[in-house]
Image: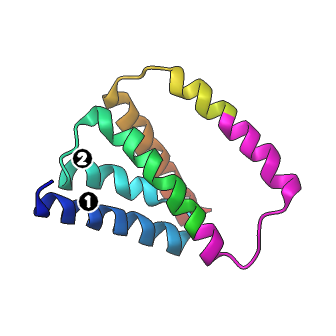
Amino acid sequence: MERSRMLRLIFAGFCAGAVNGLLGAGGGMILVPLLIVLCRLPEEEVFPTSIAIMLPVCLVSLLWGSSSWPPRELLLPCLAGSALGGLIAGKIRIPTIWLHRILGIFILWGGVRQLWG
C-alpha cells in the first residue's frame, strides 16, 4: 500500500477514534465520509469497513473513557437486540445511495435533538 494512502487511512481512523472517545459515540459518522472522500474507498467497501473499525474503537472508548461498566441488566438485552437487528439488517440489500440518505437523516435528527433537546 502506498504511503500517502496509509497516512490517510490512519488519519481517518484517528478522527473516528477521537470523536468516539470524546463523545462516547459518533465515530462512524465521521469515518464513513472520510473513507469515501479522503481515502477514496469504493462505495461497497465503506459501510462494512466502518463497522469493522468501530467495534474495537467503541470497546476502547468504553474501557478507557468510562468510569463504570454498564449494568448487566441493561447491557445484555441491548446486546441481544442489537445483534438480532444487525443480522436482519445485514441480509437486506439496500442501494448505497439510500444508505447515505438514511445515515444523513440520522445525523440531522441527532443534531437537531442535541440543539433543541
Determine the main secondary structure of the stretch shown in magenta. helix
* Number of numbered discs overlaid on the protein picture: 2
Q: Residue at x 75, y 39 (%)?
A: 80
Magenta segment: 61-83
- The residue type indicated by label 1 comes to Leu
Q: Residue at x 53, y 65 (%)?
A: 115
- Per the rendering, the mark at residue 9 is 1
Q: Secondary structure at mark 1?
A: helix
Answer with the quarter of the image where residue 12 lies. bottom left
Question: Residue 66: where, in percent of width, then height?
Answer: 67, 75
Q: Is residue 80 above or below residue 9?
A: above
Q: Residue at x 73, y 45 (%)?
A: 79
The quarter of the rendered structure image containing the C terminus is bottom right
Q: Is residue 60 above or below residue 31?
A: below
Q: Is residue 18 left or right of residue 79?
A: left
- Foreground disc of the pair 2, 1: 1
- Per the rendering, the mark at residue 25 is none
- Name the residue that disc number 2 marks: 36
Q: Secondary structure at mark 2?
A: helix
- The residue type indicated by label 2 comes to Ile
Q: Hey, which residue is sitting farthest front in the picture? A: 1
Q: Is residue 29 magenta?
A: no
The residue carrying pointer 1 sits among few (fewer than 14), some (14 to 19) or many (20 or more) residues within 10 Å by Cα, namely some
